[in-house]
Image (spheres, rainbow, N blue to C red):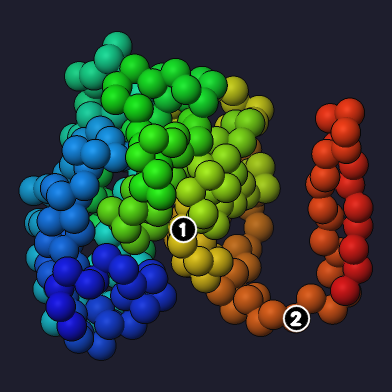
Amino acid sequence: MDIADIPFLSVAQLSELIKNRTISPVETVEAYLDRIDSLNGKLYAYLTVCRDEALQAAKESERALEQGEYRGPLHGVPVAVKDQLNTAGIRTTSGTPIFGDFVPEEDATVIAKLKSAGAILLGKLNMTEFGTTSLSHAFDTARNPWDLERFTGGSSSGSGGATAAFLCATSLGEDTGGSVRGPAAWCGLVGLRPTWGRVSRYGLRPGMWSMDTIGPLSRTVEDCALTLQAIAGHDPLDAHTWDVPVPDYRAALDGNLTGKSLWMALNDLHGVTIFYPEDY
């Protein structure tokens, strides 16, 4: 395989190739870094690229594979996260120059979980200032890779742009009032706002404590399931998380909708949302 083609693989495809050692974590990270170098100057998806840290993590990931220490589907997979999540030793701006030099001392729980799952952090992604509104960027406004004259949606703007442009394999955003779902819709991605309490928010720079929710943005439903699998679960550091087992989300993708209800939200001419249940 041509290394330049690696970023176009889904997480599920990439995972299998890394697991059977057809390609290496180092090759994978290098391919993504090359693509970021080529395109981020036009897309403004990343605020911080963790080049050295990612390459070092890739080498450690490769050594773990050599020693038979495979961590699961995200082992060696490059990810990126909204710059609202604390990352130890890496600046976390919350999209504002006010925190332009803020460097946390510890990782947010979801970052620690991604690392534990073997994922490799490529960098921190653009967002509107403090995660407010859709167009209030204090840094360069993220651009939609489908049309550079258009926006990616907010406030997880960089998560939408980077994932859609194949600048990371999957990403995390944060959704208070649509900030994962909006960029997913605008960029042609799969975005999920998990049920409140399913994913720890410890280490998230807060917007509204009763509504903030961390969720994945991915290019496929399966990739979204794999990402959520890695970050979901009870966290003693977040009293609002559920102390219940985490389902196997990937295994649930069997295509069987028997007995399920799909609720479709449509807007009528007066702007009122009406919900129509459809049973299968």
Q: Residues within 10 Å of mark 2 (few under 14, many from 20)?
A: few
Badge 1 local density, few (<14 within 10 Å), some, or many (20+)?
A: many
Which residue in the protein does label 1 denote? 218
Pick whichever of labels 2 and 1 is earlier in the sequence.
1
Q: Which three-letter amino acid code belongs to the residue tagged 1? A: Ser
Point out the image quarter for the C terminus: bottom right
Q: Quadrant of residue 255?
A: bottom right
Q: Residue at x 29, y 22 (%)?
A: 139
Alpha-carbon span between mark 2 and mark 1:
22 Å
Report the residue at 44% width, 18% height from top.
Answer: 136
Is residue 27 shown to the viewer in this render? Answer: yes
SS at mark 1 in the image: strand
Q: How far across and down, in percent of the image, does residue 28 sit?
A: 19, 68
Counting every numbered tag in the picture gives 2
Classify 249 as above or below 163.
below
Q: Which residue is mark 2?
A: 256
Q: Which residue sits at x=67%, y=48%?
A: 195
Q: Work out whether residue 87 can be spotted.
A: no
Image height check: is 101 above or below 119? above
- Closer to the camera in the image, 63 or 155: 155
Q: Is residue 129 above or below residue 219?
A: above
The part of the image, by quadrant, that contains residue 12 is: bottom left
Residue closest to the eye, 245 or 218: 218
Q: Quadrant of the N terminus?
A: bottom left
Please state the horizontal and vertical placement of residue 15, each as a whole percent of the image. 33, 76
Q: Amino acid at mark 2?
A: Asn
Q: Pick out the residue farthest to the top.
A: 98
The residue depicted at 27 percent of the width and 82 percent of the height is 17
Q: Position of residue 53 (x, y in %)?
A: 13, 49
Left or right, 30 with respect to 274, comes to: left
Circles 2 and 1: CB atoms closer than 8 Å: no
> What SS does tag 2 mark?
loop
